[in-house]
């Protein structure tokens, strides 16, 4: 589902590394809440779907958990509310939509949201007015969530102190043969380094009676239309 994509884009696709621009480790705060708007295209069952989503995400290194709540609009399918919880303590990911829960296996290593060592530094951009702006740094890198899938990532980050905040992100996902799976563009904001309701990290009640776990692969991560329809 799309929220799974959001979680991957913010955190699973990133890994601990050095900041290429100034050789200082640049990672997201250890506790973070924010909002994101995303839009893109995904190819499913031989069809092309346009989608958009408003997402609130929650990230806690101490709890080793990432949660998202999204309202997703897919062309021809209407709006769907989706909630996800990725628990790296137990190696379980939970996705709830239309009253159904999908449980997937995750690695038990928490993926910190940092600039990876493989990233190429693209330069800086001042966002805002001439007198009131943020100076952001842009990076580009490629990750391989599986043997058959690669994702090209471009990220625009704002540094505040020793932390980096994603303010814009673009991804292009392809198969090993070069076939396009999805494209996504995001803008992020409303950052908070506290989480008012820690219950967002509780396992959804719909998942208490979920079927046996499934393997987390590119189909579940990117082919999210199947889970809506």
Image (cartoon, rainbow, N blue to C red):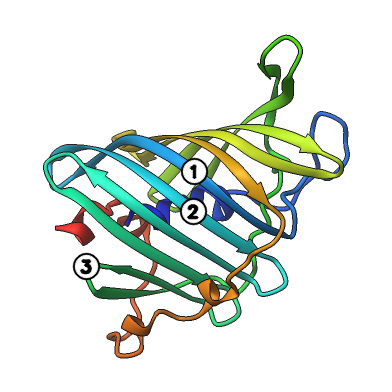
Q: Is residue 103 visible?
A: yes
Please rate how many residues cluster around mark 1, counting C-alpha atoms within 10 Å: few if below 14, some from 14 to 19, many from 20. many
CA–CA distance in space, label 1 to label 3: 22 Å
Instruction: Give the x, y percent position of residue 72.
Output: 30, 49
Q: Secondary structure at mark 3?
A: loop
Local crowd size for mark 2, using a 10 Å CA cut-off: few (<14), some (14–19), many (≥20)? many
Q: Residue shown at 70%/17% (left/top)?
A: 126
Please name the residue that numbered disc 1 is placed on. Answer: 36
Q: Which residue is mark 3?
A: 98
Q: Is residue 92 above or below residue 134?
A: below
User: Which mark is first along the chain, 3 or 1?
Assistant: 1
* Residue underneath mark 2: 56
Say the numbered circle drawn on residue 140.
none
The percent position of residue 150, horizontal first and vertical second, equals 45, 42
| Residue at the far bottom in the pictured view | 209
Q: Nearer the viewer, residue 83 or 61?
A: 83
Using residue 11 as the reference point, say whether residue 207 is left or right of it: left
Q: Is residue 86 above or below residue 56?
A: below
Report how far apart the C-alphas of labels 1 and 2 lie in the structure. 6 Å
Residue 35 position (above or below residue 90): above
- The quarter of the displayed image where residue 107 is located: bottom right
Can you give x and y, in whole percent of width and height, for residue 11 in the image? 58, 53
Q: Residue at x 27, y 52 (%)?
A: 223
Q: Quadrant of residue 100?
A: bottom left
User: Can residue 183 be spotted in the picture?
Assistant: no
The residues bearing labels 2 and 3 have C-alpha atoms spaced at a distance of 18 Å
- Labels 1 & 2 near each other (Cβ < 8 A): yes
Q: Secondary structure at mark 1?
A: strand
Determine whether, in the image, residue 56 is placed left or right of residue 207. Answer: right
């Amino acid at each position: 589902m799309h929220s799974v994509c959001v979680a991957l884009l913010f955190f699973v696709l990133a890994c601990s590394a050095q900041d290429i621009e100034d050789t200082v480790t640049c990672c997201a705060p250890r506790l973070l809440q924010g909002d994101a708007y995303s839009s893109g295209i995904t190819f499913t069952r031989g069809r092309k779907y346009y989608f958009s989503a408003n997402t609130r995400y929650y990230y806690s290194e101490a709890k080793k958990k990432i949660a998202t709540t999204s309202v997703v609009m897919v062309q021809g399918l209407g709006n769907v509310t989706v909630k996800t919880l990725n628990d790296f303590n137990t190696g379980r990911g939970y996705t709830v939509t239309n009253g159904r829960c999908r449980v997937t296996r995750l690695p038990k290593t928490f993926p910190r949201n940092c600039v990876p060592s493989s990233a190429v530094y693209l330069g800086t951009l001042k966002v805002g007015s001439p007198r009131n702006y943020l100076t952001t740094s842009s990076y580009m890198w490629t990750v391989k969530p599986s043997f058959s899938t690669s994702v090209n990532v471009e990220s625009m980050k704002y540094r505040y102190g020793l932390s980096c905040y994603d303010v814009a992100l673009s991804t292009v996902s392809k198969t090993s043969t070069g076939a396009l799976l999805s494209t996504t563009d995001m803008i992020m904001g409303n950052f908070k380094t506290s989480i008012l309701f820690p219950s967002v990290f509780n396992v959804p009640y719909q998942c208490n009676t979920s079927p046996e776990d499934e393997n987390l692969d590119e189909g579940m991560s990117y082919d999210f239309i199947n889970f809506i329809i």
